[in-house]
């Protein structure tokens, strides 16, 4: 659901930083000002990820209690919680506080892909644990762990988020039952995370600047090794701000890599009424990883409605080629090998490779297969 390490420029996503309902709540009443110099923009870039985290947390807390989980079930085209969501994943959210001490997270065993990502309020991601086989303790540096044999995760802030992804493969009832076994002990502490008021217009000015910087950095290949830090200082602040603007709750480069297409291999923009073949090379992910391919509406950045209710293809639902790669046909009617319906909606396509092999190139090829 979220973009982080870009292997091709995501041109045309000037408004994708609108994360939907999760970021609708304002932090505080803005201060009026007409224009800003570069030093003010640079200073705001430093706190931009924190502002986005606080807004998402505050929106979630309107309907949920800290230290508890909420789960999405299968995401459909009406779900606008985040941009570029995955259709066949049950997402879990748990915003919590460590002000009263560490928390302990217990999880069930699952024989398909299941990940637990931990975020702090600076959008650092100190841990992404896949199919955890022991408890997870989340604590501050000065707190002792109540279980030294657990997976121990240390946060830079009191407040944070546990974000889970459980892949659904025609087994939603099983997944929903397992979700009830994802339990946090503790976490109901102080959820306040004060930030200075944002001058009116500064956020929009900064995002416009970041859109241009995203184009430049992508063209230079500067983002290909990741833009999401495990700890503060791992990546330049501008890289992180660009990544958060494009897709909040992205994860570090060693967990997932992305490839996207807004044009075909010849450089022509994707025609909503055209038929395209996407060729995905073999060997992108480790044995316990998987790939997914999803088209998204250019206008909404959400899943595309279609009669078949097929919104993505994954390693679990596609027929591979003889070499282990995949061919996916994208077309308005969704017919063809591993077909994906696009419903004549202007769209872009996103390939995700979860648990990528070291040094792998996740570049795919999108070719038009009908006459223009």
Image (cartoon, rainbow, N blue to C red):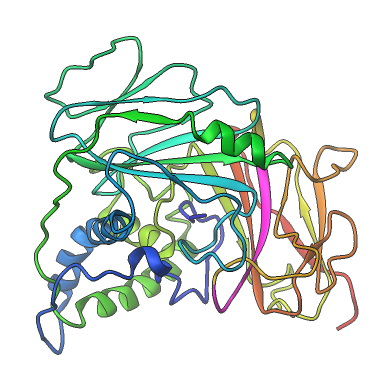
* Residue 101 visible to the viewer: yes
- Does 44 sit left or right of 176 as displayed? left
Task: Please give the name of the residue rendered at 56% of the width and 31% of the height, measured from the top-left corner.
Answer: 178
Percent coordinates x, y for residue 187 in the rendering: 24, 35
Between residue 228 and residue 363, name the one nearer to us. Answer: 228
Toward the top, the furthest residue is: 149
Between residue 335 and residue 192, name the one nearer to us. Answer: 192
Q: Please name the predominant secondary structure of the magenta segment in the image.
A: strand
Task: Please give the name of the residue rendered at 53% of the width and 65% of the height, measured from the top-left corner.
Answer: 9
Between residue 37 and residue 221, name the one nearer to us. Answer: 37
Picture layout, residue 91 above or below residue 115: below
- The magenta-colored residue range is 291-300
Task: Please give the name of the residue rendered at 75% of the width and 63% of the height, measured from the top-left corner.
Answer: 366
- Does 205 sit left or right of 358 as displayed? left
Percent coordinates x, y for residue 96 in the rendering: 26, 41
Corner quadrant of residue 15: bottom left
Percent coordinates x, y for residue 244 in the rendering: 36, 59
Quadrant assignment for the C terminus: bottom right
- Does 267 sit left or right of 96 as displayed? right
Corner quadrant of residue 340: bottom right
């Amino acid at each position: 659901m979220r973009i982080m390490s870009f292997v091709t420029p995501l041109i045309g996503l000037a408004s994708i930083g609108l994360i939907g309902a999760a970021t609708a709540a304002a932090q505080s009443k803005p201060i009026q000002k007409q224009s800003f110099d570069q030093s003010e923009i640079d200073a705001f870039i430093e706190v931009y990820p924190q502002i986005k985290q606080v807004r998402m947390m505050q929106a979630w807390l309107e309907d949920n209690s800290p230290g508890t989980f909420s789960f999405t079930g299968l995401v459909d085209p009406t779900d606008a919680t985040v941009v570029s969501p995955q259709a066949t994943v049950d997402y879990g959210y748990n915003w919590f506080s460590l002000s009263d001490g560490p928390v302990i997270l217990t999880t069930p065993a699952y024989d398909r892909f299941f990940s637990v990502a931990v975020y702090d309020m600076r959008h650092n991601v100190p841990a992404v644990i896949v199919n955890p086989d022991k408890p997870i303790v989340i604590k501050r540096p000065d707190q002792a762990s109540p279980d030294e044999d657990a997976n121990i995760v240390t946060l830079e802030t009191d407040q944070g988020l546990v974000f889970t992804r459980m892949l659904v493969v025609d087994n939603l009832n099983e997944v929903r039952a397992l979700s009830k076994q994802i339990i946090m002990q503790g976490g109901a502490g102080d959820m306040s995370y004060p930030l200075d008021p944002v001058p009116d217009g500064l956020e929009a000015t900064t995002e416009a600047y970041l859109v241009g910087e995203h184009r430049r950095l992508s063209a230079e290949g500067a983002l290909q090794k990741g833009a999401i830090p495990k700890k503060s200082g791992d990546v330049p602040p501008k890289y992180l701000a660009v990544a958060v603007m494009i897709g909040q709750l992205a994860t570090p480069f060693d967990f997932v890599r992305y490839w996207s297409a807004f044009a075909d291999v010849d450089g022509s923009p994707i025609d909503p009424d055209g038929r395209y073949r996407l060729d995905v090379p073999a060997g992108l992910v480790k044995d316990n990883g998987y790939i997914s391919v999803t088209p998204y509406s250019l206008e909404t950045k959400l899943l595309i409605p279609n009669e078949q209710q097929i919104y993505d293809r994954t390693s679990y639902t596609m027929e591979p080629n003889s070499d282990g790669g995949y061919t996916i046909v994208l077309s308005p009617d969704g017919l063809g090998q591993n077909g994906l319906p696009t419903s004549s909606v202007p769209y872009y396509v996103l390939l995700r490779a979860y648990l990528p092999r070291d040094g792998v190139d996740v570049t795919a090829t999108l070719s038009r297969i009908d006459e223009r």
